[in-house]
Amino acid sequence: ILNVEQSPQSLHVQEGDSTNFTCSFPSSNFYALHWYRWETAKSPEALFVMTLNGDEKKKGRISATLNTKEGYSYLYIKGSQPEDSATYLCALLDYGGSQGNLIFGKGTKLSVKP
Amino acid sequence: EAGVTQFPSHSVIEKGQTVTLRCDPISGHDNLYWYRRVMGKEIKFLLHFVKESKQDESGMPNNRFLAERTGGTYSTLKVQPAELEDSGVYFCASSPVLGVMVAGELFFGEGSRLTVL
């Protein structure tokens, strides 16, 4: 059974702080890693889809890196704002799985205080 | 353009009753997926349609769950009879047709929260 682990489970930061969290996954049979941002009662929203070892992607103040050999990805938020408060989910697409059969971690819940 | 829409947003039923959840994917998206998040746990894959065909239903928990996508447009997920452990948020997602070796993002709906009492 494939497991995707995210840490920390939750994080409380002050507005303006930069922060990062980790997604760990089994590196064998890696195909792609997805990051989603989810606010409760809203739709999870895709941030990044990463496929290549060493990939770095950026969207505004949010960026992500990928290491497929050691099985981890980092998500960074620079200068956190209250509107960044959400749960950040990573999900693995395994080579042996069908397209769309994503294996999710439990998420990191970020709270940004003004 | 409308996103993925799900109905109802919240349903409260008693154990043993039946509930049908509906998902309207983004127009033109042939791929449609159902996922479920039980409280405190991770979001888990249930099944994947390509048009009206079930591509992968390996995540369906048991035969009390029936998913359909007649005509390849909207999809329904029926739970009959519902049990307490079926409570959770049921997400639908869609994606367009992609090449064989492309890993694209999924577009999620807001979810249907099911509470079984």
Image: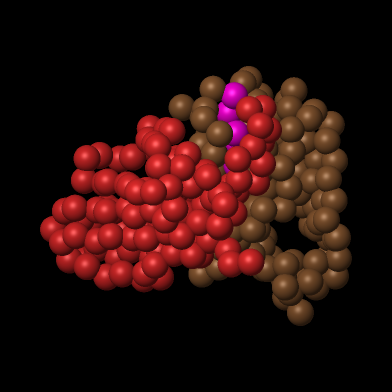
Chain colours: A brown, B red
Tell me residue B1's x, y (percent): 63, 66
Q: Which picture quadrant has residue A43?
A: bottom right
Q: Main secondary structure of the magenta part?
A: strand
- For the view shown, which residue lies furthest in the top direction? A28
Say which of A49 and A12 sits in front. Answer: A49
Label tally: 0
Q: Residue at x 85, y 51 (%)?
A: A58
Q: Residue at x 86, y 60 (%)?
A: A60
Compared to residue B15, the image places residue B54 above or below, namely above
Could you tell whether A83 is left or right of B7 in the image? right
* Residue extent of the magenta highlight: A90-95
Q: Is A93 in the magenta?
A: yes
Say which of B30 and B81 sits in front. Answer: B30
Say which of B71 and B62 sits in front. Answer: B71
Q: Which picture quadrant has residue B82?
A: bottom left
Could you tell whether B102 is left or right of B11 in the image? right
Q: Residue at x 66, y 41 (%)?
A: B104
Q: Residue A59: tell me if it is visible.
A: yes
Could you tell whether B79 is left or right of B45 in the image? left
Tell me residue B73's x, y (percent): 44, 53
- For the view shown, which residue lies furthest in the bottom direction? A114
Compared to residue A92, the image places residue B29 above or below, namely below
Q: Residue at x 39, y 67 (%)?
A: B7
Q: Is B20 in the magenta?
A: no
Q: Residue A67: tell me if it is visible.
A: no
- For the view shown, which residue lies furthest in the left direction? B16
Could you tell whether B107 is left or right of B47 in the image? right
Rendered-image quadrant of the C terminus of chain A: bottom right
